[in-house]
Image (spheres, helix red, strand yellow):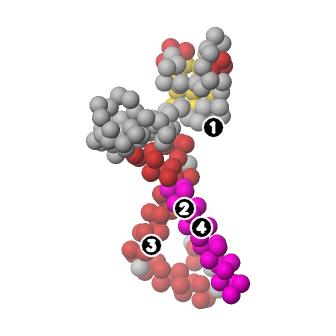
Amino acid sequence: MVERLIKNELKLKQWRRFKRNRLAAFSAVIILIVTIVSLTAEMWANSKPIVMSYKGSIYFPAFNRYHPSVFNPSSEDFVTNYRKLDIKENGWAIWPIIHWDPYEANKTVDDYPSRPTSDNWLGTDEGGRDVMARLLYGYRYSLSYAFLVWFITTIIAIAL
């Protein structure tokens, strides 16, 4: 299918040679998957539900910020803690696979850093933050840095 889109013979030859190298093709697929997962990290690792129904209304906490007074008018908090809401009694929620924000500490573990558990797949770091969530979000910065270095290097090479 890709070969039909390539009109240039040299590019077509390069594409076929790339496909023959199975390790290179496998690596490209892995990098593509990890990049997509990292760019959509809010769907995989977050301390807020992706979608929730609360008292008859639908909310998208992973993408919008809601003041705590939306769910509890008498609340004096500044940030909504979705884990403390009585969602099961007043609606439903779809949570991410990893229930931790990359900056949130897990206070239920005995000591930091902790071993991998069912709550923290790769354990926690010295601050009690989930390592898997931090890796998912951190890959974005690594990818951005790599593209920035590539862009600056290209500009310098063209100028020279």
In the displayed structure, would residue 43 be above or below residue 61? below
Q: Earlier in the sequence, mark 4 or mark 1?
A: 1
Whether residue 82 appears in this view of the structure is yes
Disc 2: which residue: 143
Quarter of the image that includes the N terminus: bottom right
Label 2: state its secondary structure: helix
User: Which amino acid, mark 1?
Assistant: Phe
| Residue to which mark 3 is pinned | 25
Residue beneath disc 1: 63
**Amino acid found under the numbered disc labelled 2:** Leu
Extreme residue in the top direction: 74
* Residue 140 is one of the magenta-drawn residues: yes
Q: CA distance from mark 4 to mark 1?
A: 26 Å
From this view, report whether residue 108 is shown above or below residue 44. Answer: above
Distance in Å between CA atoms under marks 1 and 3: 34 Å
Q: Give the residue displayed 62% in from the left and 32% down from the top.
A: 60
> Magenta segment, which residues?
139-160
Picture quarter with the C terminus: bottom right
Q: Earlier in the sequence, mark 3 or mark 2?
A: 3
The quadrant where residue 128 appears? top left
Could you say which is closer to the camera, residue 2 or residue 154? 154
Q: Is residue 72 visible?
A: no
Please tell me the numbered disc located at residue 147.
Answer: 4
Sequence-earlier tag: 4 or 3: 3
